[in-house]
């Protein structure tokens, strides 16, 4: 762990330890320039496929997962071992991974491979790029502020100039409604400033976080209208319907969508039926139904019928 190993030595050790593999079961179907003369089926040629695939696995998978560090140079001329292959005379390299020369097992890779018992990530370098002020302004003080952090600040706060954002409760609530968390903003401001947040900012974030948990969406529901308050009171207190509805004013009940079927059964037992909503009635080319008037408010002008 932590030492550079030449890739060719790693391949030699892989074969010597009995961990050899084959990329192709029939290498005759793979070739350079000519299907016959340039085929990889000739003796010794399949080894080039296996070796290049090892380079590919190390470079594209192990390195991108963070398991190994790599030392890489431009592939052209970096690995001239394929010069004896027919059809390779004009090839500057056999694969784009030819430039991979050394690999180094790092702490994460050692832990994932069982070489080490634990893993601790390297401490993140803290560089102040933000100044968070008590008046709820957030100021970018360094040109090194990442574009992604600028976009995040645009989502959480109101931009008042090219390098200044204003924290506001309404904007924070809008960001939360879009799926962003207050904790994410708190972490961004703390890491970006490298200092504890001012009390005014901390209280604002705590207040918004608390408000997010106080009003919750319990799912869709149906609004039921009764023709008189006495009937609404009856249904709200009857043993067959009261568990499936809530009062909403004098003549209305709210029935959760999950309880609608049970409410309908209880309603039939009481002797009533849930009627469909009243349709609008066209009078003189204009809709003049009471239901429409209640929905749009008295005095609202209705569109003409086509």
Image: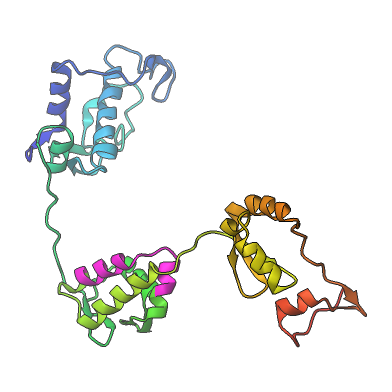
Q: Nearer the viewer, residue 304 or 105?
A: 304
Snapshot quadrant of residue 298: bottom right
Write the residue at 25% across / 32% down.
Answer: 55
The quarter of the picture where the C terminus appears is bottom right
User: Magenta stretch containing residue 53, yes or no?
Assistant: no
Snapshot quadrant of residue 82: top left
Q: Is residue 33 left or right of residue 110?
A: right
Q: Nearer the viewer, residue 205 or 227?
A: 227
User: Do we see residue 75 in this rendering?
Assistant: yes
Snapshot quadrant of residue 87: top left
Colour setting: rainbow
Instruction: From the top left corner, tell me how far across and down residue 22 is, in percent.
Output: 30, 18
Type of secondary structure dominating the magenta stretch: helix
Instruction: From the top left corner, tell me how far across and down residue 102 is, in percent.
Output: 14, 37
Magenta segment: 173-191
Q: Is residue 124 left or right of residue 44?
A: left
Instruction: From the top left corner, tell me how far across and down residue 177 is, in percent.
Output: 45, 67
The quarter of the picture where the N terminus appears is top left
Residue furthest right as drawn: 284
Q: Is residue 197 left or right of residue 159?
A: left
Write the residue at 33% across / 33% down.
Answer: 91
Write the residue at 39% across / 72% down.
Answer: 155
Q: Nearer the viewer, residue 3 or 237?
A: 237
Write the residue at 31% across / 34% down.
Answer: 95
Instruction: From the top left corner, tell me how far across and down residue 161 is, in percent.
Output: 35, 85
Q: Looking at the picture, does residue 138 appear above or below residue 226? A: below
């Amino acid at each position: 762990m932590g030492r550079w190993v030449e890739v060719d030595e790693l391949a030699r050790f892989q074969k010597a330890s009995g961990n050899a593999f084959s990329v192709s079961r029939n290498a005759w179907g793979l070739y350079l320039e000519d299907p016959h003369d340039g085929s990889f089926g000739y003796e010794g040629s399949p080894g080039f496929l296996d070796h290049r695939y090892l380079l590919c696995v190390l470079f594209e998978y192990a390195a991108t997962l963070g398991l190994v560090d790599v030392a890489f140079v431009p592939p052209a001329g970096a690995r001239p071992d394929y010069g004896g292959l027919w059809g390779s005379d004009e090839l500057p390299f056999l694969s784009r991974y030819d430039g991979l020369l050394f690999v180094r097992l790092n702490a994460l890779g050692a832990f994932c491979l069982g070489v080490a018992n634990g893993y601790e990530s390297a401490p993140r370098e803290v560089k102040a790029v933000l100044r968070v002020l008590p008046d709820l302004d957030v100021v970018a003080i360094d040109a090194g502020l990442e574009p992604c952090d600028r976009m995040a600040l645009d989502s959480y706060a109101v931009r008042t100039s090219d390098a200044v954002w204003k924290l506001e409760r309404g904007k924070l609530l809008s960001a939360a409604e879009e799926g962003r968390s207050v904790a994410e903003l708190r972490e961004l401001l703390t890491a970006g400033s490298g200092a504890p947040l001012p009390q005014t900012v901390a209280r604002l974030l705590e207040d918004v976080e608390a408000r997010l948990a106080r009003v919750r969406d319990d799912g869709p529901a149906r609004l039921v209208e009764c023709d008189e308050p006495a009937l609404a009171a009856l249904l709200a207190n009857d043993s067959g319907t009261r568990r499936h509805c809530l009062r909403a004013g004098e003549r209305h009940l709210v029935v959760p969508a999950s309880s609608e079927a049970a409410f309908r059964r209880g309603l039939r037992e009481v002797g009533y039926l849930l009627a469909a909503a009243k349709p609008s009635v066209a009078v003189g080319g204009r809709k003049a139904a009471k239901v429409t008037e209640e929905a749009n408010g008295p005095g609202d002008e209705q569109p003409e019928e086509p």
